[in-house]
Amino acid sequence: MAKFELLLPKMGESIMEATILNWVKNVGDTIEAEETIAEIATDKVDSEVPSPVGGTITKIFFKENDTVPIGEVIAWIETGAAVTTDDTPSAAAESTETASSEDHVPVRERAAEPTPSFENSNRFYSPLVKNIAKKEQISIQELDMIPGTGMQERVTKKDILNYLKDRATAPSSQTQTPAPAQQQKPAAAAVVHNGNHDIIEMDRMRKLIADHMVMSKHTSPHVTSFVEVDVTNLVEWRNKVKDQFKAKFNQSITFTPIFMEATAKAILDFPMINISVQGDKILKKHAINIGMATALPSGNLIVPVIKNADQLNLIGLTKAVNDLADRARTNKLKPEEIQDGTFTITNVGTFGNVMGTPIINQPQVAIMAVGAIRKKPAVVETPYGDLIAVRQLMFLSLSYDHRVVDGFLGGSFLRRVADYLEAFDPNRAF
């Protein structure tokens, strides 16, 4: 027998702690490798902690709602055999069923089917649930319909085993269709009526966002630059191709992937905007990972990240933007999808705002806001002289860390993004 120390895993370079939401397993419980032991939350996303080993939990070091530093030991797991602890003498006895007896599920005979693929599912499944689904030839469509009892209504090992038992005992002439899992609704904020005002308790995510914003302002001296951009060619191109694009790729093309494309090109031209600061050292990032600030139905904000954005064409960027935005709003992002961003874009134009001065998403050194596109009269230079014409104009603003990004670099980078947008080819293919 050996004692395994389970550490709180690293969730991203800017995340230093997490809150224990729920212990799925308790002292004395047996656990299999890759089975979820705890549910945790950061200021970015809620997630699960799987156990790397199988064994019996002998000690838990933190209570629910405790905030724990990344890398801290959160539990001990005794590997090799089940043991009974002094803390809960009956707990181990109640969970001494062997894995073979627990996992034995009568399965009706059926024709061999191809191994199911999980690539087309937007729902999170633990490695253990995936392995059971593959072994029992459960299709992804069938798995997506199983109601989950885990965090954010995720399917647990118990859920899938119960489903298999029900399916095996159902009459063969019947096709069992489980009820679709319901989307988790944000919990209503606690409101206290007090005379002439209401007192609203911040939810956990809002508290963490507030702390992060204050920390960013304390860390980085913010400077913001602005440019006005003529995006008439870009707007006319999108209006011309959006129906064809939807029919061909089953994707709605918005302006966001086009902004991403221009930003990635400008970062390649000005790589010192793609850095972070560590003490008195500058870390120059090789990957261009662009985060996009996304508003949630709860009113909070999350920033999913498109990794290696410079290596994607416009079709790939569109698919990535739509996928991440949809799953962000339904709380289905994976922890790795909100990590390792090197630059952030926020679209204040979504709310009808023409410009903004966003706060830097630490440990990055710059964030760009894109404003609403509006028709305005503008001076247009032609071979026949200057003319007044109606053009599609918008503002871009860049907030940057003046410790390491001076006005020349910040202003030049922002102007380069604008140049790429203004040079957009109205006759380009996808």
Image (cartoon, rainbow, N blue to C red):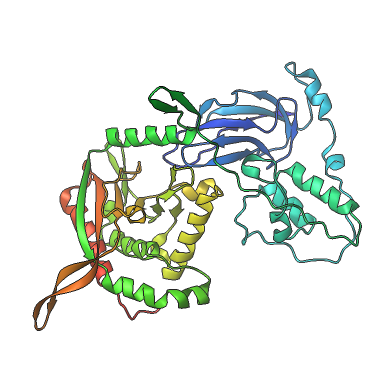
Identify the image quadrant of residue 401. Answer: top left
Residue at the image position 62 percent from the left and 61 percent from the top = 119
**Residue 340 at x, y percent in the picture:** 43, 48
Give the residue at the far bottom of this rendering. 384
Q: Nearer the viewer, residue 385 or 420?
A: 385
**Residue 190 at x, y percent in the picture:** 51, 29
Residue at the image position 75 percent from the left and 54 percent from the top = 133
**Residue 360 at x, y percent in the picture:** 31, 43
Counting labels gives 0
**Quadrant containing the C terminus in the rendered view:** bottom left
- Please say if 102 is above or below 23: below
Say whether residue 430 is visible. no
- Please say if 70 is above or below 385: above
**Quadrant containing the N terminus in the rendered view:** top right
Left or right of 369 in this view: 173: right
Left or right of 45 in this view: 262: left
Residue at the image position 43 percent from the left and 48 percent from the top = 295
Q: Nearer the viewer, residue 23 or 50?
A: 23
Give the residue at the far front of this rendering. 195
